[in-house]
Image (cartoon, grey):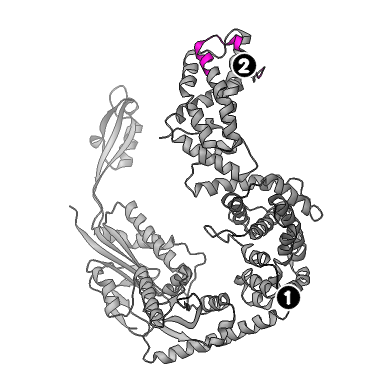
Amino acid sequence: MADSRDLLLEIGTEELPPAALDRLSAALADGFAAQLAQHQLSFHAIERFATPRRLAVRVKALATTQPHQELVRKGPTVQSAFDAQGQPTPAALGFARSCGVDMAAVEREETPKGAWLVVRQHQPGRPTAELLIPMVERALNGLPIPKRMRWGSREEEFVRPVHWVVLLFASDVVAGHVLGVPTGRDTYGHRFHRPGPIRLSDPGDYDELLRETGRVEPDFPRRRDLIQQQVETLAAEVGGSAVFDPELLDEVTALCEWPCAILGGFDPQYLDVPPEVLIETMQKNQKYFPLRSPTGGLLSRFITIANIESLDPAQVRAGNERVIRPRFADAAFFWTQDRKHPLSSFAPRLKTVVFQDQLGTLAEKSQRVGQIARYLAGLLGYDEELAARAAHLAKCDLMTAMIFEFAGLQGIMGRYYAQHSGEDPAVCTAMEEQYLPRYAGDRLPATACGRILALAERLDTLVGIFAIGQRPTGVKDPYALRRAAIGVLRLLIETPLELDLRDLLEFTAQELRTKVAVDTAASEVFDYILDRLRSYCQDQDLEGDVVDAVLAVSGHYPTDLYRRILAVQEFKRLPEADALASANKRTRNILRKSGGVTHPAVQAAFLVDPAEIALAERIDELTPVVTTHLAAKNYGHALKLLAGMRPEVDAFFDRVMVMADDVQIRANRLALLSRLEGLFLGIADISRLQPVT
């Protein structure tokens, strides 16, 4: 077994961007592992570490040398390598010279395609220590850093200035420079608790030495768990539970090296402000963890994470309480001022805000959304006036002082202000639900009015932006049309809403006709949303060929398309599926090459072969039953019945010559195949299904 040692690489920097820390750490580990694989260096495992001031990897049991290799270089054919007298030709001599050997070292190798000259050379593996510096540089250069920086007069670039580099292979320092900094064995602990150098003698000591001596927890997941445990313990001491946002927990973890939780409080009078406002302030602005009571209400307490063990925690607590006070005071002021007027009074101000130059103001958009909402309400049997009222008020909270300060609360504050204004409860709820789903996996609107408003808003945006020629391209999607399209699909499929998507888009386009040309917009958006249906299905592990098979026969109702996709996915698992898909493909080819069916009806008088008679009888037997299932949208049952036709279909293709010499018999058989194909095409074009491997 090859000799192996542990390796430690640590890049010490100025404070790294917290939002990117975990991503950079993972990329460094992956990039370095790729370099090791490329150089054929075996290892047991890679551990990664990340704090605001360092990125590190530890490679366990890394081979000390590359494996030896035998290189085989292939030259010219033997026939072209020697002349009639058996002397080497210039081609043979040039080959030997390029390999650095004389002709005596050149061998012959027999292959099925003839004899060739070859040179076999033994290449000893290089010591790992000689390869490490270039590998580290390449791994660092491959990190996903959007904008690199230089510092001082240095030419090296990195995400932040580099202050030290540890590169330790067992107990030996791998001498060299990384990012212009000489490598060594000295790491550094906490900026205040242990600012001096800490000497490392072995990679295995790294994390424990930083914890015990340096007052640094280098392991990112362990530090995150430690923060969560400290917060939960403090919260329990005051009879509460912490509000954990995963993104905030990651960000706080990336902001500290030695986390210390501190409990703070604020004036209970601020609890009169909606809790979402206080939570938004604490989480987004101050990076605090809010606390809830056992009944779910907000406590006038919070927990902050300090990056130091203070000798006087009361001072840290007081400082954090002091900075949150004016923010809460502002929020309380906005809450009071906004409620002096009904929500509807903010509607005229929407005329002053442009949604998009060509599509008009937010007021114009609200009017269009109102008409679309009315139309949707009529289709769904919902109160059209309530739907229109919700659309009229939908964007009014954008004009309030609270949303100017806390943009992330749009919709939520709309609900509060609508309730205060005495609006119908359905309208109040729709104010918040119009934005659902906000992201992948988010909840959907729970009320009919909310679903209508959410759908109307997205339809207007999609058709309008496509009409002005700004559909998404590559990674650019400034109006979040991909998310809007997925939102439309989720609203229609998961709610579900049995609505004709093409009809909705055509109606939406007509509402926009006074602003922009909408000639092809509805059709383009329809195709775009169906493309997104592929992504939607892929996220649910539905196979691409299944989706293609259903979309090939078209359909305007996403709910119905999705039912058929699920049914075909189940059908594909049946043992008969591959054979029937192959038969459908053969049928499709025969019908295409024949120029089509001359008469659609199958005439019993021209059925002469027992196999075609049996198939015709089976089709006659199943057609009314399958048709009934299709009408009831029981696609799974219909496909199971059709799967039972496999024996008759196999027998037909084994025994019957479709393109018979007799014109009438040939036409009759083509008509029979057309009927067979038609039964499946009511659900999907199963000829597109790929064989199950």
Type of the residue with mark 1: Pro
In-front residue for pair 191/504 = 504
Locate residue 440 relative to residue 15 in the image: left or right. right
Locate residue 7 relative to residue 327 in the image: left or right. left
**Residue appearing at x 55%, y 18% in the figure:** 616
Answer whether residue 600 is magenta in the image.
yes
Q: Circle 2 is placed at which residue position?
A: 602
| Residue span colored magenta | 598-615
Residue 258 appearing in the image: yes
Q: Locate the C terminus and report the quarter of the image it occupies.
A: top left
Answer whether residue 581 is magenta in the image.
no
In-front residue for pair 241/146 = 241
Q: Circle 1 is placed at which residue position?
A: 342
- Image position, residue 111 (x, y; %): 30, 27
Locate residue 81 relative to residue 591 in the image: left or right. left
Asked which secondary structure carries label 2, the reply is: loop
- Image position, residue 432 (x, y; %): 62, 66
